[in-house]
Amino acid sequence: MPDRISLQVLRYRPEQEAEPTVQEFEVPCHKDWVVLDGLNYIKDRLDGSLTYRWSCRMGICGSCGMTVNGEPKLTCATFLSEYAPGPVQVAPLRNFPIIRDLVIEMGDFMRKLPEVKPWIIRKEEKPLAEGEYLQTPEQLDDYKQFSMCINCMLCYAACPVVGLDSHFLGPAAIALAQRYNLDSRDQGAAERLEVLSQHEGIWGCTFVGECTKVCPKNVDPAGAIQRYKLKATIEWLKSFFMPRGAR
Amino acid sequence: MNQQPNYTEHHPRWYRTRVSTYWWLEKPAYFLFILRELSSVFVAWFVVFLLMLVAAVTGGAESYRQFLAWAARPGVVALNVVSLLFVLLHTITWFNLAPQAMAVRFRGKRVPGIWIAGSNYAAWVIVSGVVLWLIVQ
């Protein structure tokens, strides 16, 4: 393994340049260094103006998502040695506007997320004295996979539909809606159905499946969307053929 | 804190990359996806071909003979060979995706994906076998 590796980092300084440019840096290539360590080395020792987001360094906060050699990755979980002898290209996540260097503007995602009401909705809260809402391991198992989402937006960067249709709700928002729909404590599925069953909801998805492949937490948003398509179709058929009371 | 933050979707200093018309050539996975979408055209062609065959059969011996002669033309054979490849791609890719779209539970436990895909393949083999038996008979 080489002891140094080249990082080709996309720079965008809106006060200086109209378009992003690539700047190359040499960083140490230690066995236990991830791409984020390389970026921190640049920021600390080579160029303090390099701008990027990061926080936890352990795949929990979802801040450090970037495009590494063309693939959306959490840079805290992507080892430099995987790309030896290099070079390693680091760019911002695709399908989002770039604010500066590796920092993307995530307002679009932040506006879409609350549209699906990703929280537990109860028609009536039971009194505190009655205790907590109990769940069996099987009930937990129903939604647990979808609850692992850390909002890192790698799936938005991987999805061509997000890039082509800015109105599409996107993989993570729909997977999170499913997380609450499948929760035995939740009673809000009907409220979410309206948003999800629009063209810009589940029907915008053409099942490319890349969202699931890039997800660092194995959430499988593509699976969540296809299962919801099945459910929405059944609900539509029910509303068509069955009397109101029997639904 | 009551003031609305001044967010705008058209910030002049944000850099926006346009999605290329050829985005589907950027990754093998995207290309395979486009091929899978295109395969539906060839599935439709097989349906049309089958309907033409049925119409020829109901039209009597002469129209059936004419249909067979037309179907044996090199151009039609080539189209059908390409269509067969696309239909196979369509079938295999969708069968492999089926476990993602279906969460089947049996006695409280999730049925493994391989069983869902496997049952699709098994049904495919059985139906193909029945059709082959009907033709050979």
Image (cartoon, grey):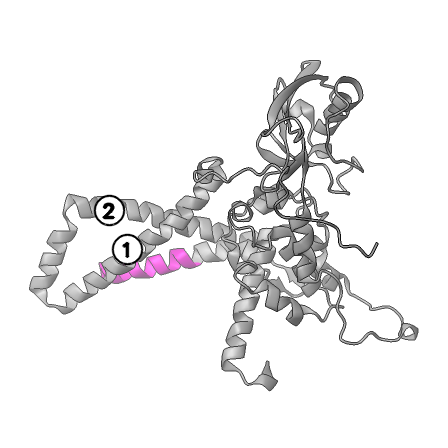
Q: Residue at x 48, y 35 (%)?
A: B26
Q: Is residue A182 magenta?
A: no
Residue ranking furthest to the top: A3
Residue A83 in view (yes/no):
yes
Q: Is residue B129 magenta?
A: yes
Of label 1 and label 2, which has the lower sequence position? 1
* Element type at mark 2: helix
* Residue type for callout 1: Trp
Q: CA distance from mark 1 to mark 2?
A: 9 Å
Q: Is residue B60 left or right of residue A9?
A: left
Residue ranking furthest to the right: A129
User: Which chain is mark 2 on?
Assistant: B
Q: Is residue B21 left or right of residue B43?
A: right
* Element type at mark 1: helix
Question: Which quadrant holds residue A12?
Answer: top right
* Residue type for callout 2: Leu
- Local crowd at mark 2 within 10 Å, few (<14), some, or many (≥20)? few
Image coordinates for residue A114, horizontal then vertical, percent = 70, 58
Q: Is residue A206 left or right of residue A157?
A: left
Name the residue that disc number 1 marks: B45
Q: Nearer the viewer, residue B105 or A148?
A: A148
Above or below for B46 versus B32: below
Question: Which quadrant holds residue A120?
Answer: bottom right
